[in-house]
Image (cartoon, rainbow, N blue to C red):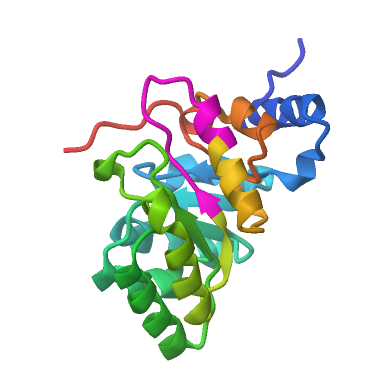
Amino acid sequence: MEKADTPLQQVQATIAKASKIARRDPGDVTLVAVSKTHPAEAIAPLLVEGHRHFGENRVQEAQGKWPMLRDVYPAVQLHLIGQLQSNKAEDAVALFDVIHSLDRPSLVTALAKAMDKQDKRVPCFVQVDVGEEDQKGGCPVADLPKLLHLARDADIPVAGLMCLPPFDIEPAPFFAFLDKLARDHELEGRSMGMSGDYETAIKLGATHVRVGTALFGRRPALD
C-alpha cells in the first residue's frame, strides 16, 4: 500500500499545478507555513521534511517557541504576517526575517529606528487595504505612494505588497488589483493567498502564499 502524501507534499503539489497553469516556475513561489497558535511539536514534522519558511501573527507568541526551534534548525526564515504595534518594532526586527504588515508612517519610523539600532535591515511588505476594511489594517490605496516613499527614505527594504481580501467574497479581483499596484510601483513581491485561495493567488502573481489550515489543520481554540 502506497504511503499517503503529507500535507506539505499536497500543498507543494498544488503550488506546482497552479504555477504550471500560470506558466510560472513553482520555485518563484515561497510557501509560508502559518504556524500561529500551533505548538512546537506540531511544527516539528514540517521542519523534519525540510520546510524552512514559517509565519507568525504575534511577536510574543513567536518569542516563546522559535528561539528553541531555531537552535536546531538555524536556516528557518521567520515571517511576521500579523499586524504590528509600533512598540513591538524592536522585538520584531530582532526575531523576524521578513515583515508582511508595514502599513502606516508611525510604523515606518519605529521599524527604521529599530533596524538602525540593531544594524539589521529586515525586508518588509507594505500591507494594502484593498477591501477598505479598517479592522484588518493596511495602508489605504491612495496613501500607498507616500508610504512607499517614506519607507525607502528610511532605508527599509521594500519586498513588495501584501493584502488580505474581504472574507467570503471572490478574491481574484483583489489579487489582480494588488498585482497591478505592485507592477505600477515596480515591486517584485506579492504576498497574497491563504489556504482557501492560494491557487488563485498564484495564478494572479503571488510570490508568497500564507498557508496554515491546509498544513496544520484547524487552529486550536484559544482560551
- Point 79% across, 24% down: residue: 21
Residue farthest to the top, as pictured: 1
Residue 143 point in image, percent of width and height: 39, 58
**Placement of 151 over or under 79, stated as above or below:** below
Pick out the residue farthest to the left: 223
Residue 31 visible? The answer is no
Image spot of residue 136 (x, y percent): 30, 43
Q: Quadrant of residue 27?
A: top right
Start and end of the magenta stretch? Answer: 161-176
Using the image as rendered, state which of residue 39 and residue 100 is in the foreground: 100
**Left of 194 or right of it: where is 206?**
right
Is 197 rendered above or below residue 124?
Answer: above
Outermost residue toward the front? 142
User: Picture coordinates of residue 20 (x, y %)?
Assistant: 81, 28
Between 7 and 172, the residue placed more toward the observer is: 172
Residue at image location 36% in from the left, 26% down from the top: 167
Q: How many marks?
A: 0
Q: Quadrant of the C terminus?
A: top left
- The quadrant the N terminus occupies is top right
Q: Nearer the viewer, residue 116 or 58?
A: 116
Residue 196 locus on image (x, y percent)? 50, 24
Can the viewer see residue 127?
A: yes
